[in-house]
Image: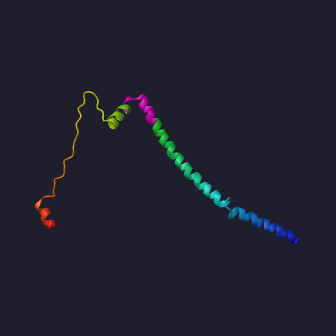
Amino acid sequence: MKWLAAALAVAVILLQYRVWISADGVREVERLKRAVATQRADNEQLAERNRQLAAEVRDLKTGMDALEERARSDLGMIARNETFYQVVPARPADTSHSPARTAAVR
């Protein structure tokens, strides 16, 4: 009877080892759960991006407003009877030759 109890104890210990310590036990299950959660988050982001792209495609197929906006922003096009004005920012004053700067350098 002692041999049977010892054999059962060894079997339980070996099974617990497989569950808790081995590479395909609890640690692997937790790693897979984290990987699934990460993949689901990535899938949600991609699904949102797909929804936005589908809406943009619908707009481009049906409406002229989206097409006109695209032509203006991406291609720099203007409509008929419009005048194009380009505003160039003023250049900063060149201070490299000013007397105050020269005196400070010496």
User: Going by the picture, which residue comes out furthest to the bottom?
Assistant: 2
Q: Is residue 7 magenta?
A: no
Horizontal side of 21 relative to 35 (left or right) equals right
Residue at figure coordinates x 77%, y 65% from the top left: 12
Residue at figure coordinates x 37%, y 29% from the top left: 64
Look at the image and give the residue range highlighted in magenta.
Answer: 55-65
**In the rendered image, which quarter is residue 88 located in?**
top left
Of residues 78 and 75, which is closer to you in this image?
75
Horizontal side of 80 relative to 100 (left or right) equals right
Residue at figure coordinates x 35%, y 34% from the top left: 69
What's the magenta bit mostly, secondary-structure-wise?
Answer: helix
* Residue 80 image offset from top left, x and y in percent: 27, 27
* Residue 5 image offset from top left, x and y in percent: 84, 69
- Give the quarter of the figure containing the C terminus: bottom left
Horizontal side of 43 relative to 32 (left or right) equals left
* Residue 28 image offset from top left, x and y in percent: 64, 58
Of residues 63 and 94, which is closer to you in this image?
94
Q: Vertical placement of 98 versus 77: above or below?
A: below
Q: Is residue 56 magenta?
A: yes
* Residue 53 image offset from top left, x and y in percent: 46, 38
**In the rendered image, which quarter is residue 100 located in?**
bottom left
Residue at figure coordinates x 33%, y 37% from the top left: 73
Of residues 60 and 99, which is closer to you in this image?
99
**In the rendered image, which quarter is residue 86 located in?**
top left
User: Going by the picture, which residue comes out furthest to the right?
Assistant: 1
User: Going by the picture, which residue comes out furthest to the left?
Assistant: 99
